[in-house]
Amino acid sequence: MTAEECRTNQRILDSVEAIGGGYVWDTEVFAVTLMDVAVDDDKAIALCGLRGVQQIALDASRLSVATITALAGIHGLQSLVLSGRKLTDNQRNEFDRFGPEIYEVDG
């Protein structure tokens, strides 16, 4: 990861903390959580700028399908945990083609 990518990640992570979320970013794990924060599209879409993130867990109750699709398309993302949102079978089938595991949990 370049120095500029690290700075960009840190700016995004600072904004995650500013709205009540958290993260772990070390050599083994890079995960972001916004499970206790009902974010809308404009806040969540910023996560697409992260490089090297492995897991994102968030309250998806206010997110559009387009934003969830963008998050699922983050290069290298291994899992996306969605709280407060149930996907239709068609949506789940569409997301399954992206690669990360998508988990739906009760909020």
Image (cartoon, helix red, strand yellow):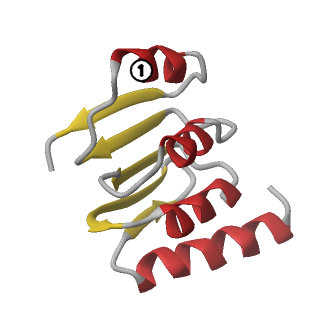
Residue visible at 84% across and 70% down?
4
Q: Nearer the viewer, residue 6 or 95?
A: 95
Q: Is residue 79 left or right of residue 82?
A: right
Q: Nearer the viewer, residue 26 or 69?
A: 69
Residue visible at 29% across and 53% down?
61
Give the total of numbered labels. 1
Q: Nearer the viewer, residue 54 or 44?
A: 44
Residue 92 in which image quadrant = top left
The residue that disc 1 covers is: 92
Residue 80 in which image quadrant = top left
Q: What's the amino acid at mark 1?
A: Arg
Residue visible at 85% across and 61% down?
2
In percent of width and height, residue 21 lies at 36, 71
In percent of width and height, residue 16 lies at 47, 74
Residue visible at 66% across and 58% down?
50
In percent of width and height, residue 58 lies at 35, 54
Q: Is residue 57 left or right of residue 49?
A: left
Q: Is residue 3 left or right of residue 37?
A: right
Q: Is residue 86 above or below residue 59?
A: above
Q: Is residue 60 left or right of residue 15?
A: left
Q: In what quadrant of the picture does the N terminus appear?
A: bottom right
Tell which residue pokes out farthest to the left in this image. 106
